[in-house]
């Protein structure tokens, strides 16, 4: 082979080797690039995954930063004073000092005795130091705690981390959410912590609880968010965060932090058969507390929005009776006369689906949404009424003003029923209201409807909770005044192929809807 051919052959071999090397290179690199791109796409498409944070190796730095902002709350209260008045010798009464001639040896003896007795009769103060709190404003000295920590206290003392004692002034309290705001005045340097976004917390997120369990002070525990939106029947706005971070007596009013050092909850209650922590504690969400605290600071009390309705949950049976596809929303059981809802045209039997653009997925969400709405604001309300969606405008009132004026206690008058008659339907014996039945079942004079005088054992109405003494006001969202009206509405519902019928029942002033199967 001549030199020319050898050169061309060498070039072909070199080109082949270069191609082979490049193929080997890309064969190794392409899977890595694909994996990287997949990871980026997954992170972008899943914001929650991008926000997840690994478990910290230690909470020491965070705890050191937060501890100075957490305080102990000590309260004192005067013990009941023993009665001083009344006739001599009466139980609990101190007899008068007998009179002796001047210079008598008994005079000095009895004087000393009665002086000591008078000192013992002075009211004694009892103290407790099982409470926690946290500073939210270092410049103005605002401290947040639970209402039950300072309830009935005559004096409140805030104890800082370095054991500095400072007398506190009560700015305002709110029993419905169990929150209280205190204020301290001192030249001592204070450390404050900010509120965070409790709605951003997810089940499984790490949290840190700091407080004063059993009076020990400055105790730090860690855990996770175990559940959200817990209703423990503590108040009308229950929406608790549940945690397994150890919370004990004395932690009440203390903060629950996220890993950014923000307060996302106020520790308030525990579930414990033993009295100690069993890993089930509850905290008021920061997003609820922020608004309450702001109102206490600005007004010394809360100023909540008010709609003027009594509501109940929408069960599957009630949803079917009303023609709803899902058992969502808040069913209006009754309307307060002259309240915001009444003025807006909302009626009993309406199902509130949206309030001010916010979905009402369940009944207990409506009170909180309304309470957080600014007073006097006109908002749209979407309701479901007799198979149709309606949009209404309501001007939100003030709950506290309505309570103070007695507006919540007003009851509309209703005409007296016609001559009573009786019938039996759905296992219920129904009778028109008579004076004798009003007295027997304690039915209000102004109430109109049909009274249940007997319930057949094993009937579907009885299983749904209807009982003697209940007054049926509406059937199928139509008013009834005599037993024949009830039977007629039920017959119509059966002819229309409905599986259940909706009854509006009054039980000694408590209005609620009951869906009774027609089978």
Image (cartoon, grey):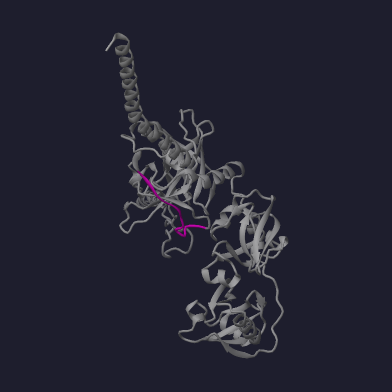
Magenta-span inclusion, residue 363: no
x%, y% of residue 153? 47, 49
Q: Quadrant of residue 324?
A: bottom right
Quadrant housing residue 222: top left
Outermost residue to the front: 1
Vertical order, 310 against 138 (above or below): below
Q: Quadrant of the N terminus?
A: top left
**Magenta residue span:** 223-235
Asked if residue 59 can be seen in this view, the reply is yes
In this picture, residue 411 sits left or right of residue 329 = right
Residue at the extreme left of the image, as rendered: 1
Question: Which SS does the magenta portion mostly show?
Answer: strand
What x and y, as percent, mark residue 456? 49, 87
Q: Position of residue 480 (x, y in %)?
A: 66, 80
Near-viewer residue (85 or 98): 85
Which sits in the foreground, 372 or 494? 494
Q: Quadrant of residue 359?
A: bottom right
Whole-percent x and y of residue 39? Answer: 40, 37
Please report the residue visible at 31 percent of the width from the left and 34 percent of the height from the top.
Answer: 58
- Residue at position x 50%, y 48% in the image: 179
Could you say which is closer to the camera, residue 196 or residue 356? 356
The residue sitting at 47% across, 35% down in the picture is: 193
* Rendered view: 450 above or below 221: below
């Amino acid at each position: 082979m001549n030199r020319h051919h050898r050169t061309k052959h060498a070039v072909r071999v070199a080109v082949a080797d270069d191609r082979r090397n490049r193929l080997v290179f890309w064969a190794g690199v392409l899977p890595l690039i694909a994996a990287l791109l997949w990871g980026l796409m997954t992170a972008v498409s899943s914001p929650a995954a991008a926000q997840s944070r690994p478990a910290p190796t230690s909470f020491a730095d965070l705890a050191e930063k937060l501890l100075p902002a957490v305080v102990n709350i000590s309260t004192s209260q005067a013990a009941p004073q023993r009665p001083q008045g009344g006739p001599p010798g009466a139980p609990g009464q101190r007899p008068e000092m007998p009179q002796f001639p001047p210079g008598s040896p008994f005079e000095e003896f009895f004087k000393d005795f009665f002086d000591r007795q008078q000192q013992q009769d002075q009211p004694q103060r009892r103290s407790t130091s099982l409470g926690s709190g946290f500073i939210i404003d270092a410049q103005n000295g605002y401290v947040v705690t639970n209402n039950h920590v300072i309830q009935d206290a005559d004096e409140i003392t805030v104890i800082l981390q370095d054991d500095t004692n400072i007398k506190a002034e009560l700015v305002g309290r709110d029993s419905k959410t169990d929150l209280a705001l205190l204020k301290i005045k001192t030249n001592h340097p204070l450390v404050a912590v900010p509120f965070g976004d409790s709605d951003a917390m997810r089940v499984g997120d790490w949290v840190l609880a700091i407080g004063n369990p059993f009076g020990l002070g400055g105790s730090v525990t860690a855990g996770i968010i175990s559940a959200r939106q817990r209703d423990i029947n503590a108040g009308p706005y229950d929406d608790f965060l549940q945690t397994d971070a150890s919370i004990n007596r004395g932690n009440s009013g203390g903060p629950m932090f996220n890993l950014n050092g923000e307060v996302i909850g106020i520790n308030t209650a525990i579930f414990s058969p033993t009295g100690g922590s069993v890993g089930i504690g509850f905290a008021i969400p920061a997003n609820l507390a922020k608004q309450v605290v702001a109102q206490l600071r600005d007004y010394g009390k809360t100023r909540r929005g008010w709609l003027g309705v009594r509501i109940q949950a929408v069960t599957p049976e009630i949803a079917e009776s009303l023609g709803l596809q899902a058992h969502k929303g808040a069913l209006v059981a009754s309307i307060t006369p002259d309240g915001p809802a009444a003025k807006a045209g909302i009626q009993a039997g309406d199902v509130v689906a949206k309030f001010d653009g916010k979905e009402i997925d369940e009944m207990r969400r409506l009170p909180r949404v309304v309470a957080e709405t600014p007073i006097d604001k006109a908002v749209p309300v979407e309701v479901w009424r007799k198979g149709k969606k309606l949009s209404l405008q309501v001007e939100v009132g003030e709950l506290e003003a309505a309570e103070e004026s007695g507006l919540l206690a007003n009851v509309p008058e209703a005409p007296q029923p016609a001559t009573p008659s009786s019938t039996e339907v759905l296992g219920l014996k129904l009778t028109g209201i008579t004076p004798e039945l009003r007295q027997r079942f304690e039915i209000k004079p102004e109430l109109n409807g049909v009274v249940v005088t007997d319930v057949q054992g094993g009937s579907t109405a009885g299983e749904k909770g209807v009982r003697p003494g209940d007054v049926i006001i509406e059937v199928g969202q139509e008013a009834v005044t005599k037993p024949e009206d009830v039977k007629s509405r039920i017959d119509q519902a059966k002819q229309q192929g409905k599986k259940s019928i909706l009854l509006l029942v009054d039980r000694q002033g408590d209005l609620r809807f009951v869906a009774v199967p027609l089978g």
